[in-house]
Image (cartoon, helix red, strand yellow):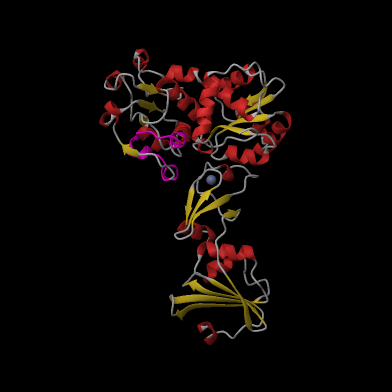
Amino acid sequence: MVGRSLISASELGRDQYEYLFREASKFNKSRPLLGKIVGLAFFEPSTRTYLSFETAAKRLGASVIGFQSEASTSVAKGENLGDTVRMLSSYADLIVMRHKFDGAAKFASSLATVPVINAGDGKHEHPTQALVDLYSIWKKFGGIDGLVYGLLGDLKYSRTINSLLRALDKFQPKKVYLISPPQLRTRQEILEKLKLPYEEVSKVDEVVGELDVMYVTRIQRERFPDEFEYMKVRDSYRVDQRVVQSMKEGSVVMHPLPRVNEIDRRVDGDPRAYYFKQASLAVEIRMALLDWILGGQ
Amino acid sequence: MEGELIVRKIKDGTVIDHIPQGKALLLLRLIGITGAEGYRLAVVSNVESRKMGKKDIIKVEGKELMGYEVELIALVAPTVTINIVRNYEVIEKRKISPPRIVRRLLKCPNNSCITNNDPEATSEFQLINQTPLLLSCSFCETMLNGEQVVKQLLGE
Ligand SMILES: [Zn+2]
């Protein structure tokens, strides 16, 4: 992995995921990336992911340069993506990039002379979120195999779901339920490459009692090609106390955050609510990834 | 060759045979032959064929098709055979194999693909399946099928 880009969750094998989980859970190197510079190129704003990467880089001893959102850079004035990536790649040892267009990270990695980590490209992929998710599950259950997963929400436009499915596909989940209204089903190009056992269902009630992991996503208005389609589905699912109370003991509810209203806040106090813990694990797994790619000592 | 009944043999050039019925003009467009290049050109449509029922044939005098042009033809008509003619003799029958990567020629159907939104990001597709034709955008993975490819090439 040293020196390589990470564009899709499918690029890592099971051994590599597990290596990262182990590294993240016992990270004790002292500033292994001292003298390195990590460039954060967030063409689409995301305070949470930006800060998580910034913290991870700084904890490793690296310096951080970067920008967030189109408004804060000359990109808004017409400088193209390519020029920005070439410039950053001459300053930084690695680029972490988020962009609103599908495939932007792959395109950037074809121009950059340093590794590119995809921190979200449109509705395509978000592989480091999948790392955070699987790491959280690994921490809780001691492994990924043999569990029953329910992925709930917008499965059509969610890059997080795409990456999570591709990462899960490297393991042996017992079953993955894809729970969504019919209009928001996982896209065919993602589904047909999966080997894991999955089943598409419309209502969470049908399977809730079987789940070890319920993974909820929000509906993102900006990913919908038209407003009408968005209006039809925006309030189509909601996880409340009633739903969570019919889950098994020891199961977890996860969410990549931020949430809108798809998880009732009263669920937060339930022992199965795992999303804040999940968010807190983001820094250490991203540290393990940055350290791996940049070959820290 | 049945087409000889309509068009005489060519001296030097290329005969594209076994074209699925009605696809000859599409193939010409694909390899960028408009008729203005000065090649002596014959397009024979709806010829009887033992193998195919009806077929089209193209004869281009003075031009030997290049590898890339052959690949493009293979994309939409993998049944085709390409005969290179020199001095009235077929000196080579080119085997058709579709390109594994198709650059620039096609547009990604996904409006939010980077290739539709950045002037520097040119389209690129990978061949997933030959028959039926299926391509996948190298950037966003959106699929493009044979029908969509033909529609695009015809400018529809
Ligand atoms: Zn595309």
Query: Picture coordinates of residue B128 (x, y %)?
Result: 49, 53
> In the picture shown, does residue A47 fall above or below B96?
above
- Check the image and name the residue furthest to the top: A269
> In the picture shown, does residue A82 fall above or below B73?
above
Query: Does A166 lie within the magenta span?
Result: yes
Query: Taking the image as drawn, is residue A246 in sight?
Result: yes
Query: Taking the image as drawn, is residue A261 in sight?
Result: no
x 45%, y 31%: residue: A221
Between B144 and A236, the one lying in front of the other is: B144
x 39%, y 38%: residue: A229
Q: Quadrant of residue A39?
A: top right
Q: Tell whether A14 sits left or right of A64.
A: left
x 36%, y 12%: residue: A269
Query: Picture coordinates of residue B77 (x, y %)?
Result: 50, 66
Q: How many marks?
A: 0
Q: Magenta residues? A: A165-192
Q: Tell whether A235 sits left or right of A28.
A: left
Query: Picture coordinates of residue A54 (x, y %)?
Result: 61, 20
> In the picture shown, does residue B100 fall above or below B29?
above
Q: Tell whether B142 sits left or right of B35.
A: left
Between A128 and A187, the one lying in front of the other is: A128
> In the picture shown, does residue A143 fall above or below B123?
above
Query: Picture coordinates of residue A124 (x, y %)?
Result: 50, 38
